[in-house]
Each structure stands twice: as C-alpha cells, then as structure tokens.
C-alpha cells in the first residue's frame, strides 16, 4: 500500500486460486468460526482466501479496479516465477485487458519478498534528493492527508520523522483494516480466558504488555538491543534480548515512594 500510494497507482490483491493454495481451507490465516469445523472446500466460497481472509482491502485503494484479464496474470504460478527470475524486485508488464476492450494497462507486480527492497529504494531517494517535493505532496494526498498536512509532510528533512509521519497517515487512512470476523472471533476467544476486562463498570482496569522476541531478534530488534546494553556499559550484550525488568521500569519508581506518593495496585497481563 505504501508503494502503490507513493507511485499514485491503484493497488489490487491477487490471491492464488484455491486449487493452488498450500494452506488448509484456503488461507494461512485460518478460518472464521463458521467454517473452521467444516470439511475442506465446503462453504469456502463465502469467504476470501489468502491475505484477503485477514485484511479488508479498501475500495479507495484499488480505485474500484478489477484484476486485469490478460494472459500474463491468468497463470498464477508463472507470474510468481517471473518475480523470482527478477530477483523479487518490482516487475511490470503491459497487459491487453479484455475487461477493458483490449486496452493496454501497465501492471506493476510485487510480492512480500520485494516490498522491503522497494521501500529501501524510496528511503535512499529521500536521502539523496531523488524524490521531488511534488511527488511527496501527491503521496501524502493519496494517503488521505489534508493540504496543510501534505505541505508539512513535504518539508520534513529527517528521514525517521518522514517515515513516522507517513505511517501515521497510513494508519489513519484505514488501509490496515481487518475483516469483520477477525475482531469478533478474537473477542470470543479472549473471553474464554476469564480475564477481568472492563465490559462494564464492575470490572477492573488492567495493563497489557506485549513482549515479542523470537524472529524479531534475528535482525529487526538487534539495533535496539545493542543500544540498550551499551547504555548500561556493555560493548557486547550478555544476551541478545532486552531483559524483562526494562518493561517494568515505569512500575518501580523510588522517587515516587520517597515523596510519599500513594501506591496504586495494577493488574498487568503479559
């Protein structure tokens, strides 16, 4: 979505046909409760497959366009192979779209493998002045900004601030919207835990801390982990993660106790 809006083009999701799906019941993201217990293939047509099982793709992002009907797209496997041959970078071709009386449509094809590469390309272009102010203005407007916000966005010089602003616009725009059954099924599942959520005034407040390690430690979090340990005098981190005590630092404040501030008990769920 960030790539499509930066280029000013519609974004469509192309899911593999059900017969090509490697996942049970047509998606790696599981099934809505209505069909989770049904035999494979039964009633699946009611629900989208693949990523669309999770994400409700907004019509304003696709601009009401349908998947072009042309030879290059009809064979899903060949399309994936063409991306692999190009090193999973953004590829494009001209498509004779039979849905549009054979008019030529320029189609950009990208996949999860090359999104990061493309965003890095944009990032480098920002640092080297390869993206014009007009392009940035149009990008902001494509993300639903006001004229004033677009002007502010186009004048940001710090790249970290730039991406933070872009992500804020994206989050507000509703690009990342889950399918309606996701929230419903998650809520029903969480209710089985019997946690004291505040469904009414008789329930208590609680704090939730999400600790993600695992694959994040391989690359994405490494910089933050090293920064944490360096701030504590370690040139070589003793472990490759930030210890749990760091997450709880705001709950333990000696200066509050010394000033006689009243202690408040908190329920914390991890």
Image (cartoon, grey):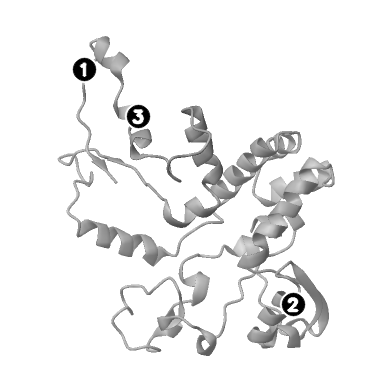
The answer to which of 205 and 144 lies nearer the viewer is 205
Callout 1–callout 3 Cβ contact below 8 Å: no
Q: Which residue is mark 1?
A: 262
Please indicate whether residue 189 sits to the left or right of residue 240 in the image.
left
Q: Is residue 250 above or below residue 206?
A: above
Q: Give the mark nearer the N terminus: 1 vs 3.
A: 3
Where is residue 133 drawn, in percent x and y? 82, 41
Q: Which residue is mark 3?
A: 249
Local secondary structure at mark 2: helix
Q: Which residue is mark 2?
A: 85
Q: Quadrant of residue 110?
A: bottom right
Q: CA distance from mark 1 to mark 3?
A: 17 Å
Q: CA distance from mark 3 to mark 2?
A: 49 Å
Residue 63 in sight in this render: no
Q: Nearer the viewer, mark 1 or mark 3?
A: 3
Local secondary structure at mark 1: loop
Residue at x 30%, y 28% (from the top left corner):
251
């Amino acid at each position: 979505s960030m790539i499509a809006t930066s280029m000013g083009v519609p974004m469509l999701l192309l899911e593999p046909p059900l017969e090509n799906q490697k996942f049970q019941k047509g998606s790696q993201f599981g099934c809505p409760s209505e069909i989770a217990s049904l035999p494979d293939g039964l009633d699946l047509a009611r629900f989208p497959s693949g990523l669309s099982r999770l994400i409700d793709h907004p019509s304003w992002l696709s601009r009401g366009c349908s998947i072009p009907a042309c030879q290059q797209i009809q064979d899903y496997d060949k399309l994936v192979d063409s991306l692999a041959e190009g090193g999973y970078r953004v590829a494009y071709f001209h498509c004779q779209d039979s849905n549009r009386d054979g008019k030529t449509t320029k189609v950009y094809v990208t996949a999860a493998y090359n999104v990061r590469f493309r965003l890095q390309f944009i990032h480098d272009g920002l640092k080297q002045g390869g993206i014009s102010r007009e392009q940035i203005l149009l990008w902001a407007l494509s993300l639903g900004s006001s004229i004033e916000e677009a002007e502010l966005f186009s004048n940001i010089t710090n790249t970290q601030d730039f991406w933070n602003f872009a992500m804020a616009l994206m989050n507000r725009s509703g690009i990342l919207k889950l399918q309606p059954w996701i929230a419903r099924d998650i809520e029903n599942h969480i209710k089985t835990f019997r946690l004291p959520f505040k469904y009414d005034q008789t329930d208590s407040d609680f704090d939730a801390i999400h600790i993600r390690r695992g694959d994040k430690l391989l690359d994405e979090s490494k910089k933050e982990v090293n920064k944490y340990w360096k701030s504590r005098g370690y040139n070589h981190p003793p472990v490759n993660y930030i210890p749990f005590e760091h997450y709880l630092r705001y709950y333990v404040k000696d200066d509050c106790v010394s000033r006689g501030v009243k202690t408040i008990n908190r329920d914390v769920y991890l």
